[in-house]
Amino acid sequence: MYGETVKEMTSKFGKLEKFEGVNFRRWKQKMRFLLTTLKVVNVLPTPMPELPDDATVDQIRRGNKWDNDDFICRGHILNGMSDALFDVYQSVETAKELCDSLESKYMAEDSSSKKFLVSNFNYYKMVDLRHVMEQFHDILRILGQFTQHNLKMDESISVSSIIDKLPPSWQTFKHMLKHKKEELSLT
């Protein structure tokens, strides 16, 4: 049964989104899930075992297993990238080095995208020309990305900010919401 599950998983792997250089955190979580399912994620935190000259059969087997797991892990990570990124990273020798390279590049870019997200939220203004619920969903999408980037904002601040973003024609409704006694939630 396990063999079928892995076989199905690897056959469906091509349907997963390829990493194009954006949304690294999301892609990383999906990739980690895949590698865990395939039982090869163990090579990421574990360094390659060094075999002494007088290695035992057991040590050689563990070394061979690590090599095989690393090969599968590295291959799946590379297969999960766009062709352009594959070309850049294909020469990296181990899955751990590959992950470390991706982390250092794309997590640094993530920190600048956090600033961009905060700016997007702060400067978002609803307009009368678009449906309010459509614009509300845009704001919720931005707040969802906050969660993805481990940015935390108190819900009462979020609600108050969203009320401030309502379009000009909603001025009376905004005033009424701001003067309510009870706490409002995003729902």
Image (spheres, grey):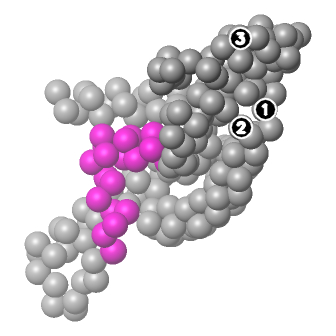
Residues marked 2 and 1 touching at CB (< 8 Å): yes
- Residue 129 image position (x, y, % from top left): 88, 10
Q: From the image, tell me which residue sits under label 3.
A: 173
Q: Amino acid at mark 3?
A: Phe
Q: Confirm whether the magenta stretch covers residue 39.
A: yes
How many C-alpha atoms fall within 10 Å of the one at disc 1: few (<14), some, or many (≥20)? some
Q: Is residue 8 left or right of residue 104?
A: left
Picture quarter containing residue 88?
bottom right
Looking at the image, how many numbered discs can be counted on the residues? Answer: 3
Can the viewer see residue 98?
no
Q: Residue at x 11, y 75 (%)?
A: 57
Boundaries of the magenta span: 27-48
Q: CA distance from mark 3 to mark 1?
A: 19 Å
On residue 96, the disc is: none
Q: Amino acid at mark 2?
A: Phe
On residue 124, the disc is: 1
Q: Amino acid at mark 1?
A: Tyr
